[in-house]
Image (cartoon, helix red, strand yellow):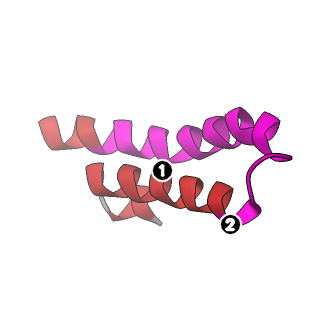
Amino acid sequence: MRNQLRDRIALAAALIAPLMVALALVPFRPHISSANLALVLVVVVVAVAALGNRTAGS
């Protein structure tokens, strides 16, 4: 039961977290290179994948 709840939370975070982080990084686009911004998004996706199941990571 607990794993199912964690997997559902991870799936919701996989759908919401990258969008929210991308929106939060929009004001920094002129000051930070695109590669660094993409790296931040990759870290968010990997962190969510580490918390959930395969569905949340893909």
With 5 as the anchor, is 22 left or right in this view?
right
Q: Estimate the x, y position of residue 4 in percent, counting from the top left.
A: 23, 42
- The residue furthest left is 1
Q: Residue at x 79, y 46 (%)?
A: 31
**Res. 57 image quadrant:** bottom left
Sequence-wise first label, 2 or 1: 2
Number of marks in picture = 2
Foreground: 2 or 57? 57
| Residue range (magenta) | 7-35
With 26 as the anchor, is 24 left or right in this view?
left
**Res. 9 image quadrant:** top left
Q: Which residue is mark 1?
A: 44
| Secondary structure under the numbered disc 2 in the rendered image | helix
Q: Which mark is residue 35?
A: 2
Q: CA distance from mark 2 to mark 1?
A: 14 Å
Identity of the amino acid at label 1?
Val
